[in-house]
């Protein structure tokens, strides 16, 4: 008995010592409590701002530097690492991608909502590799990208025509601002629907687009704090909706129904068209042709193809539209950048035609302006979290296997100056709102596209905003080119400015804001959208008529 008691004591001592050693080797971070871990330190909004402050707070604990680019916390039972520098992101997520390419389990999104075949959240494995190959073929080969150019041209002309129509209807600045946002979203939606399903979006209330938007909105609305808890405590998904505190599960069930419609309805239409021989070539038809054997597609392949086609729209639309609205906000707030880009376009392209991709290399200032917009407001400020598959070390710290890795892209590219804990939001009107990490950007508090035109240009922010390592967005080239074509053609033909008071003619100032969340959406703002000349209108109308035939 005495020997057994001694062994138990030694085991306890060993456990305490090893646990203490492990804790001492972890990166610094906020204090932890039983059960909740560090969750009580996390704000409900603008987490990237607090993570930036932690870089200073926990850096002060180090003797060799006053910063800390890795911070450790536990969110309930889940270890997490925040990466607060480009150096850490590149070292861990790019160079050690074989360890950092997994995704955390997302019970709410994948198991309850039903996005089970979503390449963006699939775990690192054979299914992910297969879908990754599909997307690389569809969005990274020169043949595929060249095939999309006629579609991009057509939809960009429709975008310009719609903006001219809104101006001619005599709308005020607030309405024009909302229409601008809707027009840009429609432009991207039309691109992605055509590529995914061969479906041409000809009107703003298109059935497929409306169905997808309802489902996506439902996923966002139902995914509150209570739903997020399920990712950390999986047993909660088995508790019925009538139990107090679980009423949100009824909403989740409704969202699951909408999601199934969003996935199934386009597939059924495409499949029926293929049977009739009327289907247009698209992402889905290509995959169905590849995996049809003796006239049949296996249940596994069918669901995988459905999920992959669905994410073409879901992932591509929101990020691209956010980048476009951010660009419009920037040229409204900084009209000198708009004017300089327009002067460059006039000199290179002229006024007799619209910009084409062949002109891009001859428009360096426009390219620099686009880079600065990505630096200014990265669409996904915290990127999508990665997950570590095995223990690792970084700067003498231990990073435990299973850790959720959160890259603070927002801080890697800039820092917020005006930050209120009571109601945090970006306030550009009082202080330009943002500064960049001076480790990478000179004069980081200035919106300055010229930083990318010097003999030694600063780091291209597109190295960060499209993801990292093996999880890099496969649609980066297509998204970037779609953004470029839209903004170059808008600048060439239209003036997007601050709205003016209809009585006094004075410019209407506004306070730009970004919505807190996974996506840094720009809140619609009042603006004026006017043709630069009668010739611009004539050009757009002529191209619109040509496209319609």
Image: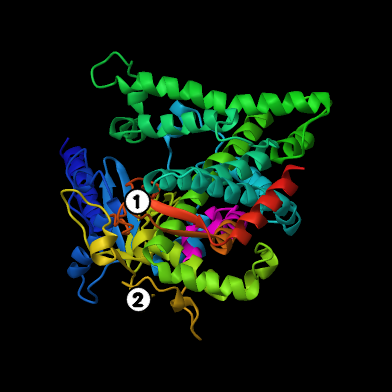
Asked if residue 349 lies left or right of residue 373, the reply is: right
Write the residue at 68% across / 45% down: 134
Element assignment for label 2: loop
Instruction: Kindly report which numbered mark, 2 or 1, lies closer to the viewer in this rendering.
Output: 1
The residue closer to the viewer here, 261 or 152, is 152
> Magenta region: which residues?
460-484
Q: Position of residue 359 (x, y in %)?
A: 66, 69
Q: Which mark is residue 328?
A: none
Q: Which mark is residue 439?
A: 2
Residue 184 in view, yes or no: no
Tell me: residue 403, above or below residue 208.
below
Mark 2 or mark 1: name the one nearer the start of the chain: 2
Identify residue for label 1: 502
Q: Which image quadrant for residue 221? A: top left
Q: Position of residue 285 (x, y in %)?
A: 74, 35
Residue 454 in view, yes or no: yes
Tell me: residue 429, above or below residue 217.
below
Q: Dot 2: few (<14), some (14–19), or many (≥20) neighbours within 10 Å? A: few
The main secondary structure of the magenta stretch is helix
Q: Position of residue 70 (x, y in %)?
A: 32, 62
The residue closer to the viewer here, 358 or 50, is 358
């Amino acid at each position: 008995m005495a020997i057994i008691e001694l062994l138990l004591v030694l085991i306890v001592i060993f456990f305490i010592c090893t646990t203490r050693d492990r804790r001492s080797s972890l990166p610094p971070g906020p204090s932890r409590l039983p059960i909740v871990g560090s969750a009580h330190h996390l704000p409900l909004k603008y987490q990237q701002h607090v993570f930036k402050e932690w870089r200073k707070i926990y850096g002060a604990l180090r003797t060799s530097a006053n910063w800390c680019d890795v911070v450790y916390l536990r969110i309930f039972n889940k270890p997490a690492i925040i990466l607060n520098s480009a150096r850490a992101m590149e070292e861990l997520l790019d160079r050690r991608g074989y360890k950092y390419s997994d995704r955390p389990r997302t019970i709410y999104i994948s198991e309850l909502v039903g996005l089970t075949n979503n390449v963006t959240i699939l775990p690192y494995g054979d299914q992910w590799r297969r879908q990754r190959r599909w997307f690389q073929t569809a969005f990274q080969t020169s043949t595929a990208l060249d095939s999309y150019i006629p579609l991009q041209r057509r939809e960009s002309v429709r975008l310009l025509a719609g903006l001219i129509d809104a101006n001619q209807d005599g709308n005020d600045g607030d309405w024009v601002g909302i229409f601008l946002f809707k027009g840009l979203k429609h432009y991207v939606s039309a691109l992605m629907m055509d590529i995914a399903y061969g479906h041409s979006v000809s009107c703003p209330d298109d059935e497929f687009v409306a169905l997808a938007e309802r489902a996506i909105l439902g996923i966002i609305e139902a995914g509150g704090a209570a739903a997020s808890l399920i990712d950390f405590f999986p047993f909660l998904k088995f508790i019925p909706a009538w139990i107090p505190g679980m009423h949100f599960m009824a909403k989740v069930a409704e969202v699951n129904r909408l999601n199934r419609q969003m996935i199934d309805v386009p597939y059924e239409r495409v499949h029926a068209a293929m049977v009739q021989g009327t289907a247009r070539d698209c992402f889905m038809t290509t995959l169905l042709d590849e995996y049809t054997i003796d006239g049949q597609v296996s249940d596994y392949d069918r669901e995988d193809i459905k999920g992959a086609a669905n994410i073409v729209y879901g992932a591509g639309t929101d990020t691209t539209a956010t980048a476009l609205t951010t660009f419009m906000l920037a040229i409204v707030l900084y009209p000198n950048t708009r004017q300089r880009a327009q002067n460059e376009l006039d000199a290179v392209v002229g006024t007799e035609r619209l910009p084409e991709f062949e002109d891009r290399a001859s428009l360096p200032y426009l390219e620099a302006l686009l880079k600065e917009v990505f630096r200014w407001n990265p669409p996904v400020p915290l990127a999508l979290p990665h997950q570590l598959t095995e223990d690792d070390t970084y700067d003498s710290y231990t990073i435990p296997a299973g850790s959720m890795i959160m890259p603070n892209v927002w801080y890697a590219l800039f820092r917020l100056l005006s930050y209120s804990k009571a109601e945090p939001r970006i306030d550009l009107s009082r202080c330009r709102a943002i500064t960049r990490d001076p480790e990478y950007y000179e004069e980081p508090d200035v919106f300055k596209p010229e930083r990318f035109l010097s003999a030694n240009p600063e780091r291209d922010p597109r190295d960060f905003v499209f993801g990292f390592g093996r999880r890099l967005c496969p649609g980066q080239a297509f998204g970037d080119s779609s953004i470029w074509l839209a903004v170059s053609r808008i600048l060439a033909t239209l003036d997007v400015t601050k709205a003016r008071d209809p009585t006094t003619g004075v410019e209407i100032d506004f306070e730009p804001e970004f919505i807190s969340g996974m996506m840094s959406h720009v809140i619609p703002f009042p603006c004026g959208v006017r043709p630069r000349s009668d010739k611009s209108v004539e050009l757009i109308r002529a191209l619109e008529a040509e496209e319609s035939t």
